[in-house]
Amino acid sequence: MIVAEQKPLEEIRRMIAPYQRVLILGCGTCMTVCDAGGELEVSFLHNALQLAQARSGDVAHTFYEHTLKRQCDPEFLGLLDEKTADVDVILSLGCGIGVQAVAERLPDMPVLPGVNTSFMGMTKESGVWDERCAACGDCRLEDTAGICPITRCTKGILNGPCAGPKKGKCEANKDMDCAWILIYQRLERLQQLDKMRRYYPPRNYRPIPRPRRITSKAGTMAGEGNG
Amino acid sequence: MANSIFEEKLGSNDFIVTTEVGPPKSVDVSEMVHHIELLKDKVDAINITDHQSSVMRFPSIGGCLVVKELGGEPILQMTCRDRNRLALEAELLLAYSRGITNVLCLTGDSVDVGDHKEAKPVFDLDSVQLLKMIRTLESGTDMGGNELKAVPHFCIGATVHPEADFIEPQLIKFDKKVAAGAQFMQTQGIFDLASLRRFMQYASQFKIKILAGIIVLSSAGMARYMNNNVPGIIVSQAIIDELAAVEKGKGLQKGIEIAARMIKTIREENLCHGVHIMAVGNEKIVPDILEAAELVNA
């Protein structure tokens, strides 16, 4: 899933300052699971903004709340039309994709990001999420025992560890495991160390000129503009 | 024919001595010039470091040009941290055209340990791929598969870490570097000769010259700092205790003594093919170490 963190309250207040009626828009999928922008966080943020406004003495904004099942899906974005008739701005707690999907749907409506989209990851324990995939478009997990060096090695290198790790930890962060030591240990356990002994050539970055597009139904999207 | 004086030396049976000079964070290179002049006739080659520890400085290629101007034999340290494949290839063309033909291929430290922590890390290639890329250039094409009008030839090396606390994956990487064409290895700092002996039992099966990395320490505090902050470096407790036992102000003298003692043992017991002395900021004391190790005019 996509993992994000809510932006600091002061930054959000600065962004919404020019607008009077603000719709705080949550997202019911990834942002709900990572506690950054689901229905609950929308409600908390609403209260926090109102409290901050009351404390500062200026009564500038009126807030509305709504949470879509998925901001990144046109199927649910249709529901926005009636919600946005009387607002001046949308503060989206969707990920970066959600913010852009809403902006594409509503050409005349300013849309602000309420979260910093961080990475694709998994829940490690309650309240802790770890990055696991860099969406590189060229998956090598078969060769690396299911542990991604592109994501989990700070240098994203392909031919084994650098000389930096100490006690199994990365030179860039003493709390972070060296991905290549993890890969070595798991390959050894699976009796597949020959995979690490292979030479891996430089990555081909051509599969990922940004932005990327995947088309499942032949022809339906081909040739259409991308923006 | 050898591609450099240093390559010729690697082909001999002589004990090889290299050292390194770190360029300044400055446009005033007079101190670096002084260090190069001091060392160029006392060692077989001088490495010029490439923003070591990810701290921005005068570039390695610039330092190598100075070594050439002064009549010395440079080794261009080249990391993959700051340049993509185009920039690396282009710099190699520049290096060759100016007579800089020894290259030490490194992945490079993380930007997180340096003084530009917000920089974009590149790592388009890793050290093994860089070695291979140089061999590709020598075969007449660049990485895009395009023909070079004139072809360079280099003497290439890499590093290995015999004292890594988890050695097996390091040895796999060592094998890959040898297979990729490395002709010499300058090891990370050795602080315990037992680990060098163990490593050489393994490495002697390969036809490659191993130069043991000797880091000159100036105090127990510096040793502890390096253990905590410098990637990969693990100074043994025995060395820290030895440095801690001397009176204040005599630390560097002790460090020189330790370095000289290790070099002497390595040479007398024929443990490996030479040494690479890293004085980290104390380049001026390298001649004292050579003298104490009885390696003058090696």
Image: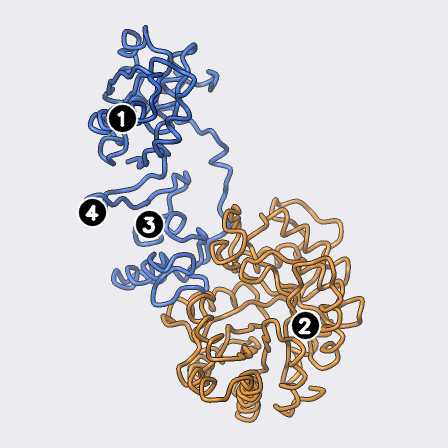
Marks 2/1: CA–CA distance: 65 Å
Gap between marks 3 and 4 measured at Cα:
26 Å
Where does label 2 land, which residue? B46
Q: Is residue A194 above or below residue A138?
A: below
Q: Is residue B289 left or right of residue B213?
A: right
Q: Are marks 2 and 1 in contact (CB under 8 Å)?
A: no
Q: Using the numbered discs, state the Cα–Cα distance from disc 1 to disc 3 in whole angstroms.
A: 52 Å
State which mark lies toward you, 3 or 4.
4
Residue behind mark 4: A125
Are the numbered discs 2 and 4 placed on the same chain, yes or no? no
Chain represented in blue: A
Task: Say which residue label 1 marks.
Answer: A51
Pointer 2 chain? B
Amino acid at circle 4: Glu
Please name the residue that numbered disc 3 is placed on.
A142
Quick check: B90 above or below A77?
below
